[in-house]
Image (tube, grey):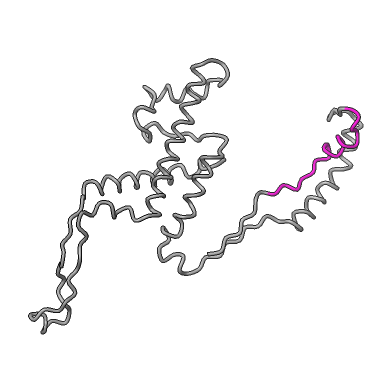
């Protein structure tokens, strides 16, 4: 796999930005006749400059997938997704909308109407509005934490901790197998596992992956 993705590039230079530099000794008004006229004159040049810069320094989006990358596609993607989720949580400037049924009860409102009403509050108006806004971030952080935890597990052999005794297969050929084309399957050590603990662990992983899929479009900074 080869991935080269450059940062977002914006080569647009506004005519008003240029005019602000030209008339540096005063503040310009965008609707004044002189500024409006000069802006119309400069606009085609600004568009041309943007096209030249877009050609010289285009945004790079190059992805090459090798055939072995899809042998275990989940294993290939997990170590890429995990650090991206961690960086998103550390640098994000906002929080996405998380449905009440996807978070623990202590992070929910009494009613769905109370949750939907958050849109009508001004964050700076009163303490209740601040609390509601804070709860939005808490729910989003909780969902991100569950996604991060799930992908952390997928980047390790998490099942190992639940084996009390590891199973072993008996591959030796016995006397009564002489006339058989395939050696029968036998346990050398049958093994013992905490299946209940493993199942609960797996369910939490599955929920983290479900949240990742459901809120995929909310993974923005």
Depth check, front residue: 198 or 121 = 198
Single out the residue that lies furthest toward the bottom.
179
Compared to 45, does 138 lie above or below?
above
Horizontal and vertical percent position of residue 119: 52, 25
Residue interval drawn in magenta: 9-26
Depth check, front residue: 15 or 200 = 200
Q: Is residue 186 left or right of residue 46?
A: left
Horizontal and vertical percent position of residue 28: 86, 29
Q: Is residue 117 left or right of residue 111?
A: right
Depth check, front residue: 70 or 90 = 90
Compared to 129, does 221 lie above or below?
below
Residue 24: within the magenta? yes
Q: Is residue 72 left or right of residue 36?
A: left
Q: Residue at x 56, y 16 (%)?
A: 125
The mark tally for this picture is 0
Residue 176: within the magenta? no
Depth check, front residue: 209 or 46 = 209
Q: Residue at x 86, y 34 (%)?
A: 20
Horizontal and vertical percent position of residue 90: 53, 40
Q: Quadrant of the C terminus?
A: top right
Q: Residue at x 62, y 58 (%)?
A: 61
Single out the residue that lies furthest toward the top.
126
Horizontal and vertical percent position of residue 56: 76, 58
Which quadrant of the structure image shows residue 107? Answer: top left
Q: Residue at x 56, y 64 (%)?
A: 2
């Amino acid at each position: 796999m080869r991935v080269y993705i450059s940062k977002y590039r914006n080569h647009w230079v506004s005519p008003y930005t240029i005019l602000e530099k030209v008339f540096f000794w005063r503040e310009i008004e965008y609707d004044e006749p002189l500024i409006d006229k000069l802006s119309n004159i400069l606009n085609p040049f600004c568009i041309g400059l943007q096209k030249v810069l877009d050609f010289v320094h285009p945004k790079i989006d190059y992805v090459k997938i090798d055939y072995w990358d899809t042998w275990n596609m989940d294993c290939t993607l997990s170590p890429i997704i995990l650090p991206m989720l961690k960086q998103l949580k550390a640098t994000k400037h906002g929080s996405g909308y998380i449905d009440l049924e996807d978070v623990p009860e202590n992070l929910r409102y009494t009613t769905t109407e109370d949750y939907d009403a958050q849109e009508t509050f001004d964050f700076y108006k009163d303490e209740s509005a601040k609390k509601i806004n804070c709860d939005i971030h808490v729910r989003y952080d909780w969902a991100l934490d569950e996604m991060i935890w799930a992908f952390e597990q997928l980047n390790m052999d998490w099942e190992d901790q639940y084996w009390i005794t590891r199973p072993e297969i008996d591959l030796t050929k016995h006397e009564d197998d002489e006339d058989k084309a395939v050696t029968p399957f036998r346990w050398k050590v049958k093994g013992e596992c905490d299946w209940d603990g493993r199942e609960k662990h797996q369910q939490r992983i599955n929920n983290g992956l479900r949240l990742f899929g459901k809120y995929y479009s909310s993974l923005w900074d």
